[in-house]
Image (spheres, rainbow, N blue to C red):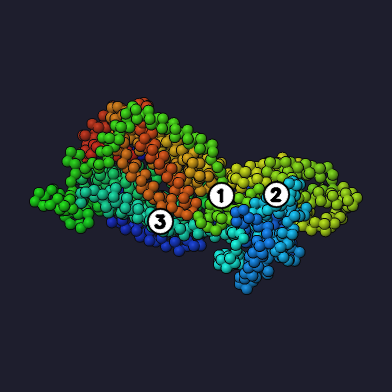
Amino acid sequence: MPARGCHTDCVERPLSRALRALGALVGAHPWPFLLLPLALSAALGAGFVFLKGLEANDIEGQFTPRGGPAKSERRFVQEHFPTNDGEHFSAQRLTGEGTFVSFLAVAAPGDSLLTAQAFAELQKLDAAVRGLQAGGLSFAQLCARSSKKCLSPNPLLSIAQSSPGGIEAMLPRLTFPLFQGRVFLAPFLGGVKLRPGDEQARPVEAAKALRLVYYLQEDDAGLREKSNRWVETFLERIPDLLASLNLSSFRVAYFTSLSRQEEFEKNTKEVVPLFSITYFLTIFFSIMSCSRLDCVRTKVWVAAFGVLSAGLSVLSSFGLLFFCGVPFVVTAANAPFLILGVGVDDMFIMVSCWQQTKVKDKIEVRMADTYAEAAVSVTITTLTDVLAFYIGMATSFPSVQSFCIYTGTALVFCYLYNLTFFGAVLALNGKREESNRHWLTFMKVEDEIQSSCSHTYNICCVGGSFDASTGAETEHPMNGFFRKHYGPFLMHTGTKVFVVVLYLLYLGSSIYGCTRLKEGIDLRNLARDGSYVIQYYDWEDEYFSEYGPRIMVVVTESIPYWNSSLRADLEECIELLENSSYVDKKFSDSWLKTYETIAKNMSLNIDDFNVFIDNLPVLFRVNPESRWDVNVSASRFYVQTVNVTTAVDESNLLNQLRGLAEDCKIPLIVYHPAFIYFDQYLVIVQNTIQNVAIASGAMLLISLLLIPSPLCSLWVTFAIASVIVGVTGFMVYWDVNLDSISMINLVICIGFSVDFSAHISYAFVASEKPKVNERAIDALYRLGYPVVQGAVSTILGVLVLAGATAYIFRTFFKIMFLVILFGAAHGLIFIPVFLTFFGCCSQSPNTQSQNYAQCYENSALAGRSSMKLTPINTVKPQVSQFAADHDDCP
């Protein structure tokens, strides 16, 4: 056989043949293909009984990177330093957040909390909290203790316990942030107005906010469970308790160790009613966009069952994964909204292809032609979407992995059900049309206008018309709009100049936005709007943000501290950390410095091993808490951070301190429980770029294999890159950070970029119109309306999430809206214009196509097929399909 020129359809051609055969089979025997998916969905849907046990909404486990350095640092600290026991509690030595309840009391505008009246009400609040009981256990029985007494919720409250007026008497001597030279007040007193004085301990004139923290014991599993039960009781009763206290001197916000998790878990419950609304909207839009005034040709039932097909795919895929024991994270609750949009999009493609077949052909032939054209397109978009999501599973964020596996699997079922269940519905509807039956009554109707009957009767009871010149259904008005009006307008020279300028503005704005993108998830965003924790977070940022977390500096090996040169090296390391822009060296805590001071005062030579070891008890008497920091194999110190107020500050703090620790001569690590969440800054950009790059490469490969034009594949790749840059950049303008939630949506970008741009590019390349402008108009005529339908249906699928009270769902809507908006803009505006600038991308009819046409005309099959171009994906004349099926053509 002679060489056929450059083509890459070695996969597309056999795939098209296989799908043509499947279409004929579905058309001939629709009932098995209809009932089998229903039975399978019912069986797999039983897996939902396991949903409750598979919910994995642990915030740390799902929204922090797996294998983050802070987790290994925490394990080291837990292994080498004893945890706080019930009699010697220290908050700064906790390796986690602890079990606690906390209040922020904020005075009215212009007032101070450091008054007798305010402290009298604080004492009432304190007494009410201590009086709460859970399971017969009071706070006094469960409280964390220091020196055998319940730890005070606030040092100033202890001073004023005997008399509320004591705070006013003490005010002239009250200094901040250090009080009495040793009590660090920054975590407990906020919005402080200071008088001139020593920078380390300036006199306090007034304070706007005060924090109370009640820690409970968690030394073993039994105590932790009892303490958590007490916290749960607190959350149930505190609203009524605060109302009964009738506090007038200040307002109160509260937070507990369980609050963030409980509020996060409530997000899932919000999705169910939203999905019901989405389902209704999608069915309504699908029916309206597929309806016609012709009572026979209208596709009401096809549209309704198309939406049902998407719903069945969600039911089957989720049920299967529940049977397999795959954890279900709240992020995966976004998947049904996306699947609904994608499934309906595929339905529009198949319906559009069906309408281009000859109405007088047998159902098997029409279904075969529909599948040969539409199913290839659906296969391309499904493969790209599924690969994008399964590649996204390579991320180190479990929440992203859960979303990707649930969505990817649902897309597989969506594809299978579209080819079977929905195909069967299309075939059965075709049989109804073939016998010219009414869409609602299923009774046969007249196919010609009855002049003796009313206009209403002719509209409602006469149907079945078609275009006699083509043998297909009459042209949809929207297709005519793209051919007669929109296409010519877009190809006007002035319009092209405007489009180029518009694209440059879009690209410039996107690139600028990318440079301003913020990283990391704000933990407050895991709670719903209006949650009581939001007020706590806001006040904490407003009044307590000057001083950040107190960081552990851990020496990870046993070193001879009695060696003066090693002590000097260690001192140098600590000084390097203290010189960080995020550390205030005045508030560092070093047991070794204290010991050196004691040794100097006692004239001890701690350079001697025996003297150093034998006199450690003296250190422990002077500073009892230091016994928890000195270990045979490790020791730890503390540095105080300042001005860590933004995600950028958190990222810089982590990188600075870890970098300084790694450069130190002494083996050091730095650790704080918050570092578990800060670790996301180390991997979020890397994970995002990795997933986008790998998935884009996979998309290009699929395009090369399934789209018979390398140039078309390159345009598809260009569209992917352009849409991703646009969505990433415009996230900034909509206050969306780059975090594990938005990273999910950037993965989605890849698949949807292909969906909206591949068809237009391919249609242009395959069109046999003689001029580039005519090719662009032809591509828009055939594909413009299906692209609009797909875009609108997908937006409707996520529209209700815009009104959600949870950040996770609102962010999903925002980025999906950007994806659809920019994807559709590329497919309908930018790509058609840009293609006309490169005439070399077009293909003029050549000898090969003429040979195929001659062979096609001589074939007995010519009478069964249409030479009309179809509007979806394989936008080639039927001679091309015939060529794919007949290699014997010259």
Corner quadrant of residue 751: top left
Residue name at image x 28 percent, y 56 percent: 31
- Disc 1 marks a residue whose amino acid type is Asp
Residue 384 visible in this rendered orientation of the protein: no
Q: Residues within 10 Å of mark 1 (few under 14, many from 20)?
A: few
In the image shown, does 64 or 548 lie closer to the viewer? 548
Residue 584: give x, y in percent of width and height: 72, 45
Q: Where is residue 236 in the image (x, y as percent from the top left)?
A: 55, 66
**Disc 3 versus disc 1: distance between alpha carbons?**
26 Å
Residue position marked by numbered label 1 in the rendering: 522
Name the disc covering residue 676, or none.
Answer: none
What is the three-letter code of the residue carrying label 2?
Leu
Residue at which label 3 appears:
275
| Pick the front one: 27 or 596 | 596
Residue 194 - label: 2
Alpha-carbon span between mark 3 and mark 2: 54 Å
Q: Compared to 354, does 876 lie above or below? A: above
Element type at mark 2:
strand
User: Which residue reaches farthest right?
Assistant: 603
Q: Which of marks 1 and 2 is in front?
A: 2
**Is residue 196 shown to the viewer in this render?**
yes
N-terminal of the pair, mark 3 or mark 2, is 2
Horizontal relation, residue 397 to residue 769: left or right? right
> Residue 38: x and y, percent?
34, 58
